[in-house]
Amino acid sequence: MENRVKLVVADVQQFQGKEEQILSQIAPCYAAKYKNTKIRRDALQELTAGYLLKRYLGVNKEEQLTYNACHKPLLVSGRAYFNLSHSADKVVLAIAGCDIGVDIEKIMDCHEATVKKMFSEKQKEELFELEGNAQNEKFTEMWTVHEAKLKLKGTGFEDSWEKIRQQIECSIYTIKMGDYYLSCATKEAAVIETEWL
């Protein structure tokens, strides 16, 4: 049976001015995150995440969600797997019939200390052969791949750096969208569909 993944990418700015309408429809935990987040763009990320969960998975109550030991959210119904990520003005919701991890990042400066701790020798060589924007883009792409793998595994950065460096066997899909990279990880190959809001 073919694994299918739907990636929904939304720009948070489209929800400005619609906050009250959306707050009345989304799960209270996302409404609370929106209200308690001081930075406006970060608050809009939480609002958008709640909206995407409501629109695509029907989640409007906290009782519909549960969490693993590392706080990865899951649907109580078990009818689908999902994962969320956000960066700057973008939020992505990944929906699949199998476990999934997703990460989106706006292109960021290459952080040498992170590279030395987290990346393999081959990745370090590849990165340090590049300079300027090319290096920043490659760093961001590699970062999203690492993060997607960790989110698939369900541990995030709670594992030690040594465990993080170990290969997590999975299938990776990565795309560049303007100033952003998006990666998703599944245990087996999947057919990817992307929707832009």
Image (tube, grey):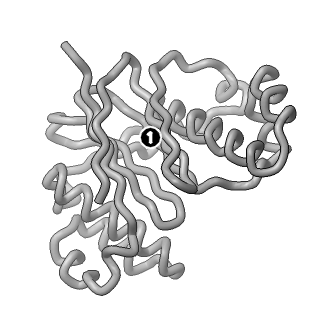
Residue 4: x and y in percent read 25, 28
Q: How many marks?
A: 1
Q: Which residue is mark 1?
A: 102
In this rendering, would 105 be left or right of 127? left
Indicate the position of residue 23 as horizontal and vertical percent values.
Answer: 23, 77
Residue 69 placement, left or right of 81: right
Q: Nearer the viewer, residue 108 or 27?
A: 108
Name the quadrant containing residue 51. Answer: bottom left
Give percent across and percent down for residue 139: 71, 41
Question: Which quadrant holds the C terminus?
Answer: bottom left
Q: Secondary structure at mark 1?
A: strand
Q: Quadrant of residue 193?
A: top left
Residue drawn 33% across and 49% down?
Answer: 93
Residue drawn at the location 48% of the way across and 80% of the way down: 40
Three-letter amino acid code at the position of disc 1: Val
103 over 148 or under it: above or below: below
Quadrant of the rendering where the N terminus is positioned: top left
Relative height, residue 116 to residue 103 (above, below):
above
